[in-house]
Amino acid sequence: MVFFAKIKQTIILASPIVVGQLGVMLMGLADTIQVGQMKTGAAESLGASGMAGSIFFTIAVVGLICMQIVAPMISTAEAEDDFVGCGNLLRANIRVALFLSVITIGLIGVAGYFYDIFKQTAANRALTLPYLGLIAVSVLPVFLFSALKSFTDGLQKTSVAMYITLGALIFNIIFNHIFINGLGAIPAMGLFGAGIATLLARILMALVLAWYIFKQGRFERYLSAPAAAGVDTSFSNFADSLESGHSPQFEYASKSLWDLEKKILTIGVPSGMQGFFEIATFGMAVVMMGWISVSAQAAHIVAINMASLTYMMATGIAAAGGILVGTDIGEKNRGGIFTSGNAALLLSIVFMGICALVFYFGRGILVRAYTEEIAVVEIAVTLVVWGAIFQLFDGIQAVSLGLLRGLQDVNIPTVITIFSYWGIGIPMSYYLGISMGIGAVGIWMGLTASLVCSSVLLSWRFYARAKTVDL
């Protein structure tokens, strides 16, 4: 009964996260589909959006995951009734978001400056760089939204960010249509127009969530110090404490805000590197596809976009599992840690298994929803078969990483991801796809091997670590 109750709790907590993650991915999907339906230059624009997206997420994923690890920390503080500590973690996370935004934007700029090392066509370069510049600017609102979302998710109010994301998705689709195809005095801007719409949607998300947290009074006990003589509990006091770098009193675990920032970075950066090596693997696959042909690259973008949708849903389950593990730690409940982990992994296996069946039997219909270009469709349909195969392993490794972040275990998992993706995945993809001449399918065979390896090793690591974690 306890296990089924935990499954229910995981579903309730994960569902809004999954929908929210889906909304984020659907913004990229909207760009891909709406650009893919352009009457001219669709294949070239698909390849360019894929290259820009790969560069963006390969670099930005470190910061995004770094801030997401705060959600389990907040759930632990909440379980211990450390309400001011939750607010302190939010303060620290906002400052980390600003710091990492500057670094991330700079790194994306460097990647754009040295874009020629990817050996893409001149047409690809001309389309990719302007679009990349726009989405690079969106790093700041994206990181701020992620920091704010970690706060609400950690308090198990996961539906808040979900509704905001869905609203931004509708906004993005409407303005994609306007800016891509033109309307009235607004000229058709193609892929660059999609970048403008995405930037505006991401700014909207950050502003709305910040307004909800800081201006509605729903989180006052977390953002203000406990009432005491001479202590200002207003929101102006919160702003002052953010500026000064210290909470008025009852600092989380007797640490200053600066110490909390270092803690977030110490745990979050290695955790973010896990995402980096995975995303970089798939980004390198985009580059290798470009060495084969424009059609192969476009087909890869279509197939990987489909796989990314289900992956984002798996990361929603992973986030919920990590939050529940954080709560179990706060409650000193080792048995609960195992139950939370089992529930999340089972949900992932069931969900990704269903997705695999949908991919396999519906691959023709799904691919044609992206593009009607025959050369692209023929390759993408074959790749989606491999996407169906690696769904289960992708879900297991994603959830295992989420559970390990809940345990604040990041160093060994990082080594595992490096070994799986860059010790196995990339070499095998290059050997089969390029050296052996198998082509696009050979690259995806290597990607599948990396996911099998990481899923086995990371799930083993969770169960081993759960036995010894300090409570």
Image (spheres, rainbow, N blue to C red):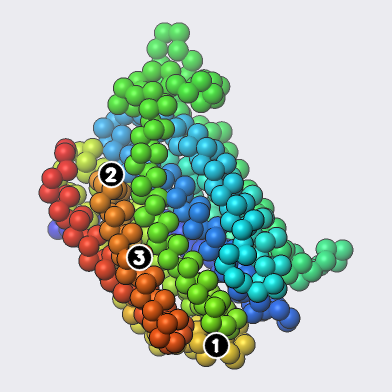
Instruction: Please state which amino acid type lies under the numbered disc 3.
Output: Tyr
Q: Position of residue 133 (x, y in %)?
A: 66, 55
- Left or right placement of residue 170 versus residue 69 in this view: right
Instruction: Please state which amino acid type lies under the numbered disc 2.
Output: Gln
Classed neighbour count for the residue bearing mark 3: other residues with Cα under 10 Å, few (<14), some (14–19), many (≥20): many
* Label ID, residue 408: 2
Above or below, 458 relative to 158: below
Q: Residue at x 31, y 53 (%)?
A: 414
Could you tell which of marks 3 and 2 lies nearer the N-terminus?
2
Q: Residue at x 44, y 87 (%)?
A: 437
- Which residue is farthest top? 230
Secondary element type, mark 2: loop
Could you tell which of marks 3 and 1 lies nearer the N-terminus?
1
- Left or right placement of residue 287 versus residue 8 in this view: right
Q: Position of residue 54 (x, y in %)?
A: 53, 63
| Distance (Cα) linking label 3 and label 2 | 22 Å
Closest to the observer, 282 or 39: 282
Quadrant of the frame with the C terminus: top left
* Label ID, residue 377: 1
Q: Which residue is disc 3 drawn over?
A: 421
